[in-house]
Image (spheres, rainbow, N blue to C red):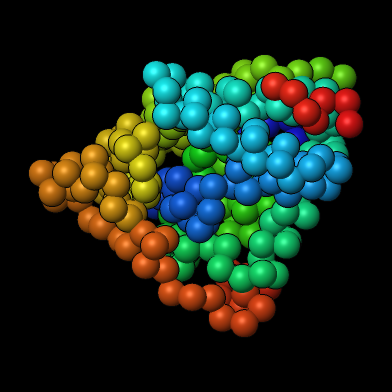
Amino acid sequence: MTAEGAERTTGAARSGGRAAFFDVDETLITRKSMLSFLRAYYGWIGCPEAEAEEAVSALKDTAAGPGGRAASNRAYYRLFAGQRVADVAAAGQRWFDDGLRAGGLFHQPVLRALRRHRANGDLIVLVSGSFSACLDPVAGHVDADVALGTVPETSGGRYTGEVRQVRIGAGKAAAVTEVLRDRGLRAGECHAYGDHASDLDLLSQVGHPVVVGEDPTLLERARVKGWRRLPGISSATPPGPSGVADGTRSEHGISGR
């Protein structure tokens, strides 16, 4: 994915006619990338911590309301209106590097599954409501072939605060459909991993869904359909020193600040 939000791809699709699709937040990584990054970014541009927490609280309230995560997702990107795309991308890399050094950034059961898929020649696809500033470093680190996230609107190298494409719920399912069609893959032979009820559309698109964690909606579907399960982040193994366990390979406030 580029800074403008386009697809990130290695250019050479892996063979075998299979793909493994991974939700990112609290599935592949152990945190909510958007909120974690927002707190860090506010601090780096000099906003008081209380302002960051106020923004995070408002986003959580929006997500709990009638519009759900899709409404919260759009509200999130309005906070970046006026910010330079390049500056936000650089901050995203800093956020990722700091998380990797601290340790515990990646959820090990899912990371091990991703490694197995990659070793088997499966196409690795990240699908997330997050955006390129957070997704690009993650995708690069795990050697993902494709990363599809929410695409904020830009103009003149700055974010406008509007969104061109949301990758929440049905948006994730659409991403899977696009990849299957464009790459000529067979849905019944593909895998997908997700941790939240909003990932149900994603999981339902493939022949081998895997539920990560304890979301009641997903657990019930897994029980009925016989879907596989992996432990969630609440039962994650503590990271090793210096984050060694994470290695995979050698509407106010911030606008104008």
**Most extreme residue toward the front, as rendered?**
50
> Picture coordinates of residue 137 (x, y %)?
68, 52
Please give the name of the residue rendered at 60% of the width and 23% of the height, measured from the top-left corner: 75
Residue 155 is left or right of residue 147, and the answer is right
> Picture coordinates of residue 209 (x, y %)?
28, 47
Residue 147 is left or right of residue 221, and the answer is right
Work out whether residue 230 or residue 64 is closer to the camera in this orientation and state it: 64
Q: Is residue 101 above or below residue 48?
A: below
Please give the name of the residue rendered at 72% of the width and 37% of the height, measured from the top-left corner: 51
Residue 47 can be seen, yes or no = yes
Q: Is residue 170 above or below residue 10?
A: above
Please give the name of the residue rendered at 63% of the width and 20% of the height, measured from the top-left corner: 163
**Most extreme residue toward the bottom, as rendered?**
241
> Picture coordinates of residue 221 (x, y %)?
18, 42
> Picture coordinates of residue 200 (x, y %)?
31, 36
Q: Is residue 31 above or below residue 66?
A: below
Work out whether residue 210 or residue 188 is closer to the camera in this orientation and state it: 210
**Most extreme residue toward the left, as rendered?**
224
Q: Quadrant of the C terminus?
A: top right
Q: Quadrant of residue 196?
A: top left
Residue 111 is left or right of residue 224, and the answer is right
Residue 86 is left or right of residue 218, and the answer is right
Work out whether residue 40 or residue 116 is closer to the camera in this orientation and state it: 40
Q: Quadrant of the N terminus?
A: top right
Residue 13 can be seen, yes or no = no
